[in-house]
Image (cartoon, coloured by chain):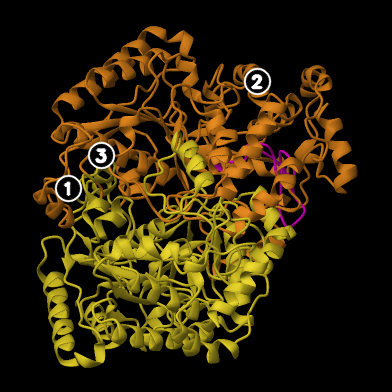
Chain colours: A orange, B yellow
């Protein structure tokens, strides 16, 4: 089936390198049934990858050299022709078209050049938002409540009905941290109504205690990623290259329970690892020299290598933080907006007591933090403020994305396709021992990863087989398809994965 | 003239409250000549303010109450109807239309609903940039070099030919700070080629010395404003409300020379204040317990109350930082993009040796930092990186803004109108002693401010007289018109200012 798809694709896209997309006979048999039963959400995308040149090809190389004169290109993965990209497929200037399961570091929700988003982009509201950029805290548009309620807040996590809007994941987290510090210090002072003292105001101007520095911290977990600005980077613990030489706060880290996969085969030792982690969290809350006012955690540690923990662990974390009057901030920047088969990954935990704040960005195309308690509004205006406080144009785009997710039931689609993909990956892992290690993400939509013994080479080779894939952590291959990823795309991906491990 | 303008405006906008816009006979005489000689850049804006209700009016009040359920409105200044705003005029839901010399906290460059920006917003490139948001560091668009060179880099400050793109002023400054730390530590290690040690990498993961914390700092000035995230806030020294309870780094602040105005009448003591400040800077560089690797400074301290210093001061600061191998970061977030009568305010200094980095945002509608030295690219990829690294849609908007600034010669326009406005303000200050104190910004385009003994009331009353004005610092009224502000708008503003001080 995938081969046939590729051939149809070649009719549209002119040429295809056989090595990239012809599949072993077995794969064809294996994949034909379910793919044939699926219909596309959108008809505008090609039916398979096209590989015309090495990547980067000659055109890309010349353009990269030109770009490098003015813009650091050393982290460049693939120069992209966005005009020619469509749906699940990313194109480059040399005519290569790849199935994209990296999706701009997990941030494209419903496909390149989605016609519904195009229509939203052409609308009067969007043009208005683009060319009349407001300072949202001072001069909000008179329809801002409506834009929020029909978009960002329409999908607010249960129990959280307020939002502070931001620009990207880092400042979404940092503004949430700021809210946490202000909340805790207000409590310590005796409530919202207590005025600041002269000494507090003077010390604030000098970055000194009691109010211009802090004896409070944000606790994060080892191998976590929460952003790269100074406060968020102090909670990021993913890789040295993210942190080297940048001043950081003396904030504590607890061990994230590094579970063994498959989870159901290691239930006992995993539960022990989680219990040990929770014990460490409590110890830090009680004893760390700079006690935490909040704990920040990702539902799945994404940049850190796709590390999962159980609902019981997160329930325990919620109980512990509640017990000690510490806020729980759930960082859904990468996990949010449907990829795990729930709109928010923390819905998998079935919490009765919701997180205090949930941060979002990436697939939302805008950013911010949700909260519910009125106490999390700082006691005075202008404490949480900046010029733009987000971008209405991007908020309107999120609204259009939410509409499309609902119309096409894309969260449930992702849950279903994720199960399909996971099952096939289990079979591949069995067939090629040692090549797809620690497969993880069962029941978590398409938010799936595995370890490869030759990860970097794995990712590089994937392009030659028509697929764009990302890595994370030390050895993880992480799959981050869009929400419009279907069984037929899974088949193409699976065939390419098999090609990779049989080609070396 | 202004009265006639207002009457014409009333024909378009249906009604006008006489108290707001009828002017004293003298004002009419005084302003008629120059205004009559001016032609509008754009014909789409109204010809004067319209005041129909108290602000907020009944519609705004109802909508603010609705918004407040989900979004903190305590810093709300005026609920805005952006569809009905145009050119220099901002509208509200009750039909009030005000001359806007605050311009979204100095961030609207060429007017609301500018037809040229509307056209740019409707173009294929913009739609592509909006709906296919790239991770710019990994998957830059193949025309990204061109977009940069014809936009952001077309107006790069002299000597700085590279850019790192960001989202807003805070992260523009913070990424510049990060570049400074990495640059300095590379020097200390012996160069770009020296690899990190195991101890450095391990300490980075623990937020500890030698490489996970820092014995280096960023020096800023008292009364400075550089943003509100954790690193930028550590350099912000404007008001306690910006800083209270938020952890800050132990970074030093030098006294900004608080000059006496008018500058030319206090040359000697101002020079002494600047010399003392430079002496303090040098002392901090040499002796502060956490020595600075960079000094960050605004050409005019804007949030801090519009504090100016002379070209000689900034030349001295450049010489000092160069002498001690400390980077000079010029924060042009508020001063940049034409408002001072130069594209970048630091052009007023005539430096032979350019700043090391210049940060921008606000009127650029996008953000980032410029730099020139190849040494300011970190020695490894992924040290300076994040998912989006800016927004191509906003970069395209800046390109359109730059095109319009050039086509209409708006920087020179601002210089000329600024001189006109400043001259008239001098006359007003003489006529109403004590009401327009410390007038400042002579020769600095429309970047003009003065102190009012009843500042907050001054700003509140301004709305009733048809003008939207902002404050800063303790007592400053800051004028931040757009670059399309003409003599005729200055006349309307001046008449309103006179109304305010004669009305109490």
Across and down, in percent, residue B293 comes to: 24, 66
Across and down, in percent, residue B490 comes to: 48, 79
Is A115 placed left or right of A194 in the picture?
Answer: right
Instruction: Pick whichever, A227 or B252, lies toward us.
Output: B252
SS for tag 2?
A: helix
- Of helix, strand and loop, which mostly describes the magenta segment? loop
Give the mark toward the camera: 1 or 2: 1
Relative height, residue B194 to residue A448 (above, below): below
Q: Residue at x 34, y 57 (%)?
A: B227
Is the C-beta separation of discs 1 and 3 under 8 Å? no
Which residue does the numbered mark 2 point to in the structure image? A412
Q: Which mark, by number, is residue A182? A: 3
Chain of the residue displaying label 2: A
| Quadrant where the image shows the C terminus of chain B | bottom left
Q: Of marks 1 and 3, which one's residue comes earlier in the chain?
A: 3
Callout 1 crowding tier (Cα within 10 Å): few <14, some 14–19, many ≥20: many
Q: CA distance from mark 2 to mark 3?
A: 38 Å
Is A44 placed left or right of B432 in the picture?
Answer: right
């Amino acid at each position: 089936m995938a081969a046939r798809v590729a051939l149809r694709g070649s009719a549209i896209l002119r040429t295809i390198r056989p090595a990239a997309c012809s599949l072993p006979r077995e794969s064809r048999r294996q994949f034909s049934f379910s793919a044939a039963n699926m219909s596309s959400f959108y008809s505008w995308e090609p039916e398979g990858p096209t590989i015309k040149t090495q990547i980067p090809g000659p055109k890309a190389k010349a353009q990269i050299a030109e770009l490098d004169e003015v813009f650091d290109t050393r982290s460049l993965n693939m120069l992209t022709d966005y005009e020619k990209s469509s749906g699940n497929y990313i194109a480059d200037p040399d005519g290569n078209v790849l199935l994209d399961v990296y999706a701009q570091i997990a941030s494209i929700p419903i496909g390149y050049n989605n016609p519904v988003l195009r229509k939203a982009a052409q609308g009067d509201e969007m043009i208005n938002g683009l060319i009349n950029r407001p300072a949202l805290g001072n001069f909000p548009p008179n329809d801002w409540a409506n834009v929020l309620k029909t978009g960002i807040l329409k999908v607010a996590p249960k129990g959280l009905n307020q939002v502070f809007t931001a620009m990207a994941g880092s400042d979404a987290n940092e503004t949430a941290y700021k809210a946490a510090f202000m909340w805790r210090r207000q409590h310590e002072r005796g409530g919202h109504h207590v005025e600041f003292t002269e000494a507090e105001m003077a010390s604030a101007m000098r970055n000194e205690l009691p109010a211009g520095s802090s004896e409070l911290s944000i606790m994060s977990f080892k191998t976590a990623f929460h952003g790269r600005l100074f406060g968020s980077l102090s909670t990021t613990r993913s890789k040295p290259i993210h942190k080297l030489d940048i001043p950081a706060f003396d904030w504590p880290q607890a061990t994230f329970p590094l579970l063994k996969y498959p989870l159901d085969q290691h239930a006992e030792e995993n539960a022990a690892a989680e219990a040990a982690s929770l014990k460490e969290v409590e110890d830090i809350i009680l004893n760390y020299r700079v006690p935490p006012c909040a704990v920040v955690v990702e539902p799945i540690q994404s940049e850190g290598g796709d590390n999962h923990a159980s609902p019981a662990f997160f329930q325990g974390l919620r109980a512990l933080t509640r017990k000690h009057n510490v806020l729980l901030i759930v960082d859904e920047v990468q996990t949010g907006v449907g990829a795990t088969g729930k709109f928010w990954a923390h819905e998998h935990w079935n919490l009765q007591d919701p997180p205090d704040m949930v941060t979002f960005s990436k697939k939302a195309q805008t950013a911010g933090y949700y909260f519910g308690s009125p106490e999390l509004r700082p006691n005075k205006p202008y404490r949480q403020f900046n010029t733009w406080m987000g971008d209405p144009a991007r908020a309107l785009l999120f609204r259009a994305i939410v509409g499309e997710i609902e119309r096409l039931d894309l969260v449930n689609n992702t849950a279903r396709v994720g199960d399909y993909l996971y099952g096939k990956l289990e079979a591949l892992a069995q067939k090629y021992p040692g090549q797809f290690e620690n497969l993880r993400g069962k029941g978590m939509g398409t938010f799936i990863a595995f370890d490869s013994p030759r990860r970097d080479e794995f990712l590089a080779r994937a392009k030659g087989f028509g697929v764009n894939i990302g890595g994370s952590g030390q050895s993880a291959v992480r799959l981050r398809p869009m929400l419009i990823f279907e069984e037929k795309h899974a088949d193409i991906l699976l065939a390419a994965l098999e090609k990779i491990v049989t080609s070396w």
